Image (cartoon, rainbow, N blue to C red):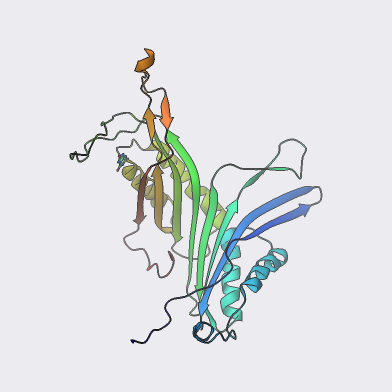
Amino acid sequence: MPDVILGPNRYGKAETRLVRVVREGEVHHLKDVTVSSSLSGDMEAVHLTGDNATVLPTDSQKNTVYAFAKQYGVDQIEDFALLLARHFVESQPPIHHARVEIEEYAWERISGDRPHSFARKGGEVRTCVVHHDRDGRTTVVSGLKDLVVLNSTGSEFHGYIQDEYTTLPPTTDRVLATAVAARWRHGAEGSAYGKSYEEVRRCLLEAFADTHSLSLQQTLYAMGKRVLDTRGEVCEIRFAMPNKHHFLVDLSPFGLDNDNEVYFAADRPYGLIEGGVLREDAPDAAFAWE
Ligand SMILES: O=c1[nH]c(=O)c2[nH]c(=O)[nH]c2[nH]1
C-alpha cells in the first residue's frame, strides 16, 4: 500500500451572523454582516493523531468576531476583516494563514422622525475576502453580488455560430438583464474602502447603462475596463453575470401583435457569463482569489 499524506486543509467558523447597533442618543445606526473565518497552519497532529494543541476552536473564532465588534466597532468590512485576520495569525504561532470573508446587508432608515426604525434594502450585498499570512502578506478583494440591472433597449445579439442545433433568432433589439456579481482586487492595501466601493459601484452601473451591447461578454469587459480606467486602487476585477433572459411572448393566438412590449422573464436556465479584466502590470495575486 502506498503511503498517504495529509492534503491541503483549513478550518474555521462559517457565517457568524453579527448585527451591531451604534446608539447616538435617540439616533441609532445599524451594521448587519456575516463573517466567515478560515485558518491554516501546523495542523498535521490534529488530523493524524487528534492532538488539538494547535487548534484555536472555531467557537473562539466566533467569539472573537463578537468581542471585536464591541471593542473596535464595525465600519468598513475590509477593515474589520483585516483586524480579525491579523489577530488570528499574530496571536497564535501555529496559525500561519487566515482568510476572512464578510458579507454586508444594507438597511435604510424608515423616513420621517423615526431614528431607530429600519427597512432592509432589497439591493445588492457588499462582500470582501481578506487574506493575511505570517510572512506579512495581505490581500484584499472587495465586491458585490445580486446587483440586478436591466437595459430595455440598446442590446443586440447576432453573428454567432449556427450549427444544426441553433434555433435562437438573431436580434438587434432585446432586453439585457443580469445580476452582477463582481469582485475586485486592491493593488495596494489601505484604500478608503467605503469611498472606493461607492465609486466602483457607480462605474459598474454607468458602464452597464452606457454600453450599446452586442453581447453580455462585451458589456462585462466594458464594465471592468471602466473600473480600471477610473479607479487607480483596483488592479483586477472578476465577474459572474447570469444572462437573465427575457423572451417575447407570442400573442398572435389572441390576435395581438407584440412589438417588444410583453416578455416572459425566465429564471432558468440562464446563460452564465464569467470573465475578468486586469492591468497588464497587476501585482501577483498570490492567494487573493482563494
Ligand atoms: O450576450 C449573450 N452572449 C451569449 O453568449 C449568448 N448565448 C445566447 O444564447 N444568448 C447570448 N447572449
Q: Residue furthest right?
A: 25
Q: Is residue 26 above or below residue 278?
A: above
Front-most of 231 and 79? 79
Q: Position of residue 38 (x, y in %)?
A: 54, 70
Quarter of the image containing the C terminus? Answer: bottom left
- Is 243 situated left or right of 47 in this image? left
Q: Note whether residue 262 is visible.
A: yes
Quarter of the image containing the N terminus? Answer: bottom left
Label tally = 0
Quarter, ligand 1? top left
Q: Position of residue 265 (x, y in %)?
A: 43, 33
Q: Is residue 3 above or below residue 205?
A: below
The image quarter containing residue 35 is: bottom right
Q: Residue furthest top?
A: 255
At 73% across and 54% down in the image, what residue appears? Answer: 21
Q: Position of residue 136 (x, y in %)?
A: 50, 77
Front-most of 4 and 82? 4
At 51% across and 72% down in the image, what residue appears? Answer: 132
- Is 63 situated left or right of 10 in this image? right
Q: Is residue 231 above or below residue 70?
A: above
At 36% across and 87% down in the image, what residue appears? Answer: 3
The image quarter containing residue 250 is: top left
Q: Position of residue 123 (x, y in %)?
A: 55, 43
- Is 89 situated left or right of 159 in this image? right
Front-most of 196 and 49? 49
Front-most of 148 and 233? 148
At 68% across and 69% down in the image, what residue appears? Answer: 63
Q: Note whether residue 256 is visible.
A: no
Q: Residue furthest front?
A: 1
